[in-house]
Amino acid sequence: GAGVSQSPSNKVTEKGKDVELRCDPISGHTALYWYRQSLGQGLEFLIYFQGNSAPDKSGLPSDRFSAERTGGSVSTLTIQRTQQEDSAVYLCASSLNPSDTQYFGPGTRLTVL
Amino acid sequence: RKEVEQDPGPFNVPEGATVAFNCTYSNSASQSFFWYRQDCRKEPKLLMSVYSSGNEDGRFTAQLNRASQYISLLIRDSKLSDSATYLCVVTQGGGADGLTFGKGTHLIIQP
């Protein structure tokens, strides 16, 4: 079956612009996760959705970051007024239920010039 | 946040050798444990779950020591294709509170 998909695969933007990243989880997976991985670094947890609600937003780096999930499926991560330090690979993962195996999408490589 | 610690390496190992590395976690309430593999510029992929009784999958053996709060991964007869970063994942269960990834151990298998 189809895995987790993310779009765009690459995004280059100018400092100060807003960007929107999309994640399409595996069908039927109730849990969805966003992570960020900077070059040579580990995965940084950003936010988690159970259904459409996000019980834990504490990982979002700043108030420029927001995320939503609608219909218990697709999620978007929005970064407003991008900064150069936002450059990273943004990974999305989904799991059937919380704490089940997570399956990752290919990521979106964001470059802020 | 709860911490998961791994030796970042790199571990340089000749092809055919056996290599082992550990991961320690600080939260004694952790419930689920996994090893993920991440190739350069790729997404992490599940390698194996880790059970208290230990589990083996071909050349890979994972073990959990709850008393000492560490997880190990053993790779026998290493192949060039085993070169990757191995991520330790620890969860509490029931939500994102316990989702913690280690920074990974970088393994290089040399011909």
Image (tube, coloured by chain):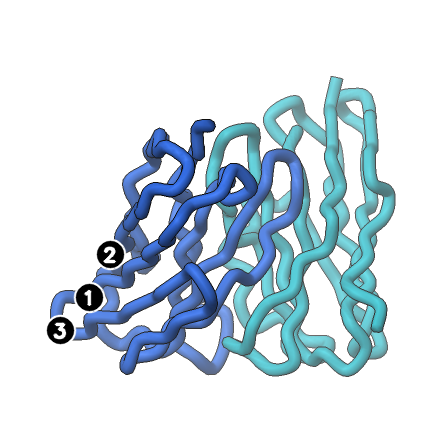
Chain colours: A cyan, B blue
The amino acid type, in three-letter code, at marker 1 is Gln
Please indicate, yes or no, whether residue B91 appears anywhere in the rendered image: no
Toward which corner of the image does residue B14 lie, by quadrant?
top left
Query: Given contact means CB atoms under 8 Å apart, are the residues at marks 2 and 1 in contact?
Result: yes
Q: Are marks 2 and 1 on the same chain?
A: yes
For label 2, the residue is: B24
For label 1, the residue is: B69
Could you tell me which residue is drawn at 52 percent across and 51 percent down? B37
Circle 2 packing at 10 Å, graded few (<14), some (14-19), many (20+), is many
B52 or A62, which lies in front?
Answer: B52
Query: Given contact means CB atoms under 8 Å apart, are the residues at marks 1 and 3 in contact?
Result: yes
Name which of mark 2 and mark 1 comes first in the sequence. Answer: 2
User: B53 left or right of A37?
Assistant: left
For label 3, the residue is: B67
Where residue A57 sits: x, y (%)? Answer: 56, 61
Pinpoint the chain carrying mark 2.
B
The number of numbered badges drawn on the structure is 3
User: B47 left or right of B34?
Assistant: right
Pinpoint the chain carrying mark 3.
B
Could you tell me which residue is drawn at 67 percent across and 75 percent down? A53
A96 or A63, which lies in front?
Answer: A96
In the displayed structure, would residue B44 be above or below residue B67? above
Where residue B105 sits: x, y (%)? Answer: 38, 41
Pinpoint the chain carrying mark 1.
B
The amino acid type, in three-letter code, at marker 3 is Ala
Q: Are marks 2 and 3 on the same chain?
A: yes
Could you tell me which residue is drawn at 59 percent across and 44 percent down? A36
Where residue A74 sits: x, y (%)? Answer: 83, 66
**Disc 1 to disc 3, C-alpha distance:** 6 Å
